[in-house]
Amino acid sequence: MTLEVHNLYTGYDGKDVVQDVSLNIPIGRITMLIGPNGCGKSTLLKAMAGILPARKGEILLNGESLRDKKRSDVAKQLALLPQSPLVPEGITVRELVQYGRYPYHKAMRSLTSKDHELVQWAMEKTGVETLADAYVQQLSGGQRQRVWIAMALAQKTEILLLDEPTTYLDIAHQLEILELLKMLNAKEHTTIVLVIHELNQAAKFADHIFGLKQGRLLCSGSARQVICEEQLLQLYDIHAEIVHKDVYGYPICMDYTLRRNSELQDL
């Protein structure tokens, strides 16, 4: 299952937030989108999911334009987990995960035995099967995020898009979610694309990184190619101290300062 973006322009209220972006998502890998706030990461993710239409350019899902595909058909091929989704009141974990099967059914049609098997499988994969009858609103932030990922898994798609899945979680739960995604990628060969802000987490978990700035694609490559002094200066206007240790196998951002602050110190 391939996902390609060609010369994309899209945005809101007639204003292009994403401008002339072209990229190919690596199949069966973990890809992360980084960049400053407001640079178009979430907008690009919504466009790739078919939620936000392209004003110009094209997005191809398995070689077919999203313009020519029904929303229900897209939902059978890729799943999107938006940032901080609202939990319906009074819903249990199992009921929420079952929503992932709805693209496969017409309105009011009951779930089949296969659907129930996939719901159970998704809960087991994300470690929430023991919480199946608990109310989602009563769960911790990390547990709740696992339930949302289980719902996306229940769609049984080859591509999973996530918008800042670790936002508002403490460091332990952030790592828990990222390790879960790493496991799903390794065992289920799911192509994963996520928006993330924490650079060291991107360096540790990403196979490929795209860096956006002011709506345009600025850089693309492995963690070593993107998480480096030159690229971070261009992306964020920061001077970063990057170290490379073979024992880790990925770059680590040790310290950083704003470019304007360091320039003032030189005066």
Image (cartoon, grey):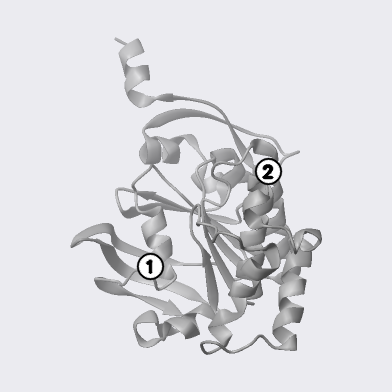
Q: Quadrant of residue 79?
A: bottom right
Please state which of residues 186 and 207 is positioned toward the viewer in this rendering. Answer: 186
Of all residues shown, which one is farthest toward the right?
130
| Residue 173 image offset from top left, x and y in percent | 68, 43
Left or right of residue 67: residue 73: right
**Circle number at residue 113:** none
| Residue 153 image offset from top left, x and y in percent | 65, 70
Nearest to the eye among marks 2 and 1: give it.
Answer: 2
Determine the residue positioned at 43% across, 41% down.
231
Q: Quadrant of the C terminus?
A: top left
Secondary structure at badge 2 equals helix
Left or right of residue 79: residue 42: left
Q: Quadrant of residue 216?
A: bottom left
Determine the residue positioned at 38% across, 67% down.
47
| Residue 264 image offset from top left, x and y in percent | 31, 14
Query: N-terminal of the two: label 2 or label 1?
Result: 1
Q: Which residue is mark 1?
A: 47
In the rendered structure, which amino acid carries the disc numbered 1? Answer: Ala
Determine the residue positioned at 70% across, 39% down.
172
| Residue 227 image offset from top left, x and y in percent | 52, 42
Q: Is residue 62 visible?
A: no
Determine the residue positioned at 50% across, 43% down.
197
Estimate how packed mark 1 is, as few (under 14), some (14 to 19) or many (20 or more) residues with alpha carbons within 10 Å: many
In the rendered structure, which amino acid carries the disc numbered 2? Answer: His
Q: Which residue is mark 2?
A: 173
Instruction: Give yes or no for contact between labels 2 and 1 (Cβ–Cβ under 8 Å).
Output: no
Estimate how packed mark 2 is, as few (under 14), some (14 to 19) or many (20 or more) residues with alpha carbons within 10 Å: some
Q: Is residue 240 above or below residue 182?
A: above
Q: Quadrant of the N terminus?
A: bottom right
Please state which of residues 95 and 126 is positioned toward the viewer in this rendering. Answer: 95
Left or right of residue 227: residue 52: left
